[in-house]
Image: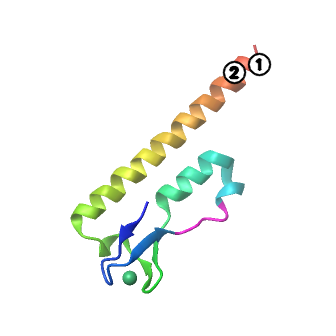
Amino acid sequence: MAYACPKCGGAVTRNDSSAAGSVGGLVGALLAIAFAGFHCAKCGPIARADFPDEVRGQLLRNSLLLVVGALVVLVAAIAVVVALNH
Ligand SMILES: [Zn+2]
C-alpha cells in the first residue's frame, strides 16, 4: 500500500520493523506495522502530521484495521490453546 509523499509526491512506504518478528510473531508484526512510521525514498522519514487530513484519516483507518486484525489473531490463538488443553 503506497501513499503519496506530501513534500515531493513520490511513493511513501511504511518503515520496516525488523524487530517485529521477535515481539510476538504475527500479532507483533501487525502491531508494529500499525504504529510504524513512514519513509520517502527522497525526503527520508515522514511524520504523520505532514500528511493532509484526508490521508491521515486513511492512515488511521488502516492502522485500526491492522490492530483489529492483530486482536483477531490473538483471540484465535488463545481459543486454539484453550481447545487443545481440554
Ligand atoms: Zn518525498
The residue singled out by tag 1 in the image is 85
Q: Is mark 2 within 8 Å of ligand 1?
A: no
Q: Residue 83, located in which quarter of the rendered image?
A: top right
Residue 11 drawn above or below residue 33 = below
Q: Which residues are magenta?
A: 15-19
| Residue positioned 28% across, 63% down in the render | 55
| Residue positioned 31% across, 83% down in the render | 7
Q: Position of residue 19 (x, y in %)?
A: 67, 63
Mark number, residue 60: none
Report crowding for label 2: few under 14, some 14 to 19, many 20 or more residues within 10 A (C-alpha).
Answer: few
| Camera-side residue of 86 and 44 | 44
Q: Are dots 2 and 1 in contact, CB under 8 Å?
A: yes
Q: Position of residue 2 (x, y in %)?
A: 41, 65
| Residue positioned 55% across, 51% down in the render | 30
- Give the quadrant of ligand 1: bottom left
Amino acid type at mark 2: Val
Q: Position of residue 65 (x, y in %)?
A: 42, 45
Element type where label 2 sits in the image: helix
Residue 48 drawn above or below residue 43 = above
Q: Specify the farthest residue to the bottom.
A: 42
- In the rendered image, the quadrant that contains the C terminus is top right
Q: Is mark 1 within 8 Å of ligand 1?
A: no
